[in-house]
Amino acid sequence: MLRHDEMFSPADLASRPCSLWRYREPLAISGDPVTLGEGFTPLVDGELAERRVSLKLDFLCPSGSYKDRGGAVMLSKLKEWGVSEILEDSSGNAGASIASYAALAGIRARIFIPSSTSAGKAAQIEMYGAHLEKIPGSREDAARAAWEAAGRIFYASHNWSPYFLAGMKTAAYEIAEQRNWQPPDWVITPAGGGGLLLGLYLGFADLLRAGITHSMPRLAAVQSEGCDPIYHAWAAGLDDIPARAKRPTAAEGISVAQPVRGKDILQAIRGSNGVVRVVSDDTVWETLESLGRLGVYVEPTSAAAPGALSRLVRDGVIAPHEDVVIFLTGSGLKATDKIVEHAAVRHAVLA
C-alpha cells in the first residue's frame, strides 16, 4: 500500500476540478495527471428493498466503470516513470480502463482477458488500440498467462499496484464530501479482488486520521454464490483467504478464486466492523431489473451489492434508521450481450 504524509484540506476543494484529482495530495503524483475527468460521480437517492438508500453511480466514469479511479492514477505514475509498454490481466473492466488511459498517455498496452469475458468489454479494449489476448479458461488462467509474459514487459497489474489502490481511496473521499463530511453508517460494495473494498476502508481511515470526519462506515462486501472465498475466510475467522473452487456466475467481475490482498481485505472488513454476504445469480438478475426500474442500467456484477440489501435488512444487520450507500460499479452497456442472452433464455422458459 502507498504510504503518504500529505492530505488535502476541505477548505481548499472549492476551487479545484470536479474530478478525483481534487484530492491530489494523497495520490503521490508529481507530474501532470493522465485524466479524462474521472471521479466525482453522482450520489443519488433511490428506493430498494422498501427502504431509502443512496446509490453511488460510479459506472458513469469515462470507460464505464469505477476502475477508472485506479487506472488514471496508475497510468499517471507510469507516464511519470517513462514506461513505454505495459501488460495487464483482467476480467474486463480493469483491462478496458487501463487500455483507455494507456492510449491517452501514449503507452502501448497488452491486455489478457478470459475468453468468456463479455463481448462489449473485449470490443472496448480493442477500440482503445490495445493488443487484446483472449485466454481460454478462467480468470486465473488469464492471470497466469500474464505472469509468464511479465518477464518481457512491465506488468501493470491493477491487483498489485499501490497507485491503482490509491485511486480507489478517492471513492471514500467523494462519498464523505458529497454528504457534507458525514460518512454513512454503511457502504455496500461488490467484492472480487477486493480493491474497491480496501480502497474505501483506507480512504475513510485517511479522513478519520486527519480529523476531517469522525466515524468509519461499516463495510458490507458482497460476493456471488458461485465464487465466495472472501465470505468463507471471513466466516471461518481466518487471517488470509485461501483459494476456493468456483462455478460460472452472472457476476463475472467478482469471480476471483483467491484475492492477492487477502489479509488486507479481511482486516478492512473487521476493522470497519463490517460483514460479508453472498447472493445467488437469481438475486443478481432480479436486482438488475429493479435497478432498471429506477432508470439505472448496470452490468450484472454491479447488481450483486444492492442484491444483498434485503437480506441485510431482514436479518437486522442494517437497522431501519441507518444510512446506506450502495456502490454501483460497471455500466450495463459493457455486458449487454450477457443481458440479452439471459433475457432470451428466460423468455424461452416462460414460453
Image (cartoon, rainbow, N blue to C red):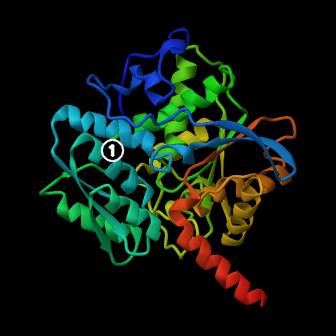
Tag count:
1
Query: Which type of secondary structure does the marked residue at label 1 adopt?
Result: helix
Residue 76 visible in this rendered orientation of the protein: yes
- The structure residue drawn at horizontal position 65% and vertical position 58%, both measured from the top left corner, is 303
**Drawn side of residue 235 relative to residue 258, left or right:** right
What residue would you read off at disc 1? 101
Residue pushed farthest top?
A: 11
Q: Nearer the viewer, residue 188 or 179?
A: 179
Q: Please determine whether, in this image, residue 78 is positioned above or below residue 306.
A: above
Residue pushed farthest front?
A: 127
Q: Nearer the viewer, residue 231 or 100?
A: 100
Q: Please determine whether, in this image, residue 84 is positioned above or below residue 117.
A: above
Residue pushed farthest left?
A: 152
Image position, residue 222 (x, y; %): 63, 55
Q: Please determine whether, in this image, residue 333 is positioned above or below residue 210.
A: below
Q: Quadrant of the C terminus?
A: bottom right
Query: Within the image, what quadrant is residue 319 found in?
Result: top right
Image position, residue 165 (x, y; %): 41, 39
Q: Nearer the viewer, residue 344 or 153?
A: 344
Residue 249 visible in this rendered orientation of the protein: no
Q: Please determine whether, in this image, residue 45 is positioned above or below residue 47.
A: above
**Drawn side of residue 182 relative to residue 300, left or right:** right
Image position, residue 122 (x, y; %): 39, 66
Q: Quadrant of the N terminus?
A: top left
- The structure residue drawn at horizontal position 32% and vertical position 29%, both measured from the top left corner, is 33
Q: Residues within 10 Å of mark 1 (few under 14, many from 20)?
A: many
Question: What amino acid is labelled 1 in the image?
Answer: Tyr
Query: Within the image, what quadrant is residue 84 found in?
Result: top left
- The structure residue drawn at horizontal position 68% and vertical position 25%, both measured from the top left corner, is 179
